[in-house]
Amino acid sequence: MAQHHSFEFEPVNRFGGASAAIRRPREITHFSYDEDHKFRLDASSLRYYYPPTLPCDLNRGFETFRQLDDSADDHLDGLLEAIVAYEKEKGAKTEIDIITWRGMMTKIMVVPYSKLDSWEMNATLFQGTIFIEENHTKKLSSRQEQFSAAARPNAMSQDIMSFWGYKFETISLLPEPWSLVSREHIESREDQVVSNYAQYCSIVRTGLGKIKMIIGGEVDAVLDFKPEDKSQPVNWVELKTTAAVVNEREQIKFERKLLKFWAQSFLLGVPKIVVGYRTPQGILERIEELETQTIPDKVRQKGKYLWDGQICINFAASFLEWLKGVMTEDGVWRIRKREKVPVIEVFKLEETGHGDILSQAFLDWRSKELAAYPTQHSAGTAHINGNGQVPEPG
């Protein structure tokens, strides 16, 4: 009989109290997708924030939008390729409990206040680490349902509303620091072709409670420059658009959005979120800079107090510790949350193997090549600690 486990998350108040220990996210490596969406082990797609000119029509350029076709399942491939390169540089395996994309951790973290959300993830255990990816089939079907849903009268289409976010990025970003960019380029951003092919992905080491994690996720921009010293925090900026808050109903919707805005940025260590407020027709009217760490207090003190960040942190730590105790064998597992069901289900799909979650290149590196690597590259491993592992960042 297949193993089937359930983690109850109601009542959510049982996750209150002292906050679980948090390891500040620290970037250990990164990679880029270029304008052809080709993987590059560099920072070539890093962008710099510079405020846009207001007001701005976010609909402009929709006809020429270069939209990436993400219907293929890329699994964890880019993340794993970057980790292999990082381990080759260090000459040792990175000891960690969980490796996943930031999107998966965001979904888990907001569970206590997301009763209507429905999602599925695939997971596998390999060499003591749990690897988690999105169930791509479920992702595509959920997106289709969202785009097929009957729109409200006079509402804009889902396609163009998705475009608004990419347009906001285009008019807010520069390819180099501000001091190196011409005024002509800055002023021509509204006319640039919008594309979501290029991405910069930050890979951080972090932790919640007893669980050590490596998380990869796209970051929109850096505010000024990126320090060469990896021990220094980076002034990342996340860009978000939302409807202007004009009544109590919009205020409630905005506070619920703030939960995901906060969780996404908290997990990768992004200190600032720039929110662009738009009209229902897509005219960007104003922008506001929010400090990530202050958002939970603002919601509690000045808002409707619809969610509690501390409960989210404690819940995520509790769930991940529980998951580590459940997933003690290899094979392929499913992690599932269903709409209006107050449990997260974890059950086995395949008794052996790792499905397609782990790339063959990663399996070969860890199973065959890594064992010989430190002896071949001993000259470069002086910074490895006595047990042959990469020391944890401070």
Image (cartoon, rainbow, N blue to C red):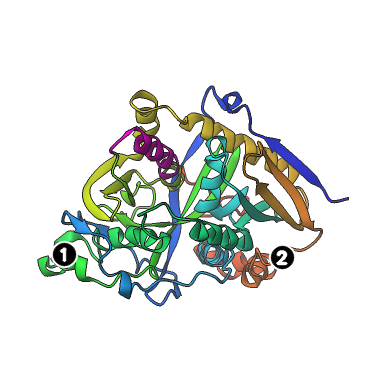
Q: Is residue 128 above or below residue 306?
A: below
Which secondary structure type mostly characterizes the magenta part of the structure?
Answer: helix
Q: Residue at x 43, y 74 (%)?
A: 37
Count of marks overlaid on the render: 2
The quadrant where residue 59 appears: bottom left
Q: Is residue 118 covered in magenta?
A: no
Task: Tell which of 90 and 108 is nearer to you.
Answer: 108
On the image, the x and y values in percent for residue 142 come to 57, 57
Q: Residue at x 64, y 45 (%)?
A: 337
Q: Is residue 309 above or below residue 108?
A: above
Relative side of 97 to 391, left or right: right
Residue highlighted by disc 1: 186
Q: Is residue 248 covered in magenta?
A: yes
On the image, the x and y values in percent for residue 26 come to 43, 48
> What crowding class fits label 2: few (fewer than 14 Cα within 10 Å), some (14-19), or many (20 or more)?
some
Q: Earlier in the sequence, mark 2 or mark 1?
A: 1
Look at label 2 and name its amino acid: Gly
On the image, the x and y values in percent for residue 363 come to 67, 67
The quadrant where residue 354 appears: bottom right
Q: Residue at x 24, y 71 (%)?
A: 192
> What element does badge 2 sit on?
loop
Q: Is residue 209 visible?
A: no
Q: Which residues are magenta?
A: 246-262
> What element does badge 1 sit on?
helix
Relative side of 188 to 236, left or right: left
Look at label 1 and name its amino acid: Ile
On the image, the x and y values in percent for residue 260 come to 45, 43
Residue highlighted by disc 2: 355
Task: Tell which of 39 and 73 is nearer to you.
Answer: 73
Q: Is residue 213 above or below residue 191?
A: above
What is the distance, in whole Å, between disc 2 and disc 1 at their CAs? 46 Å
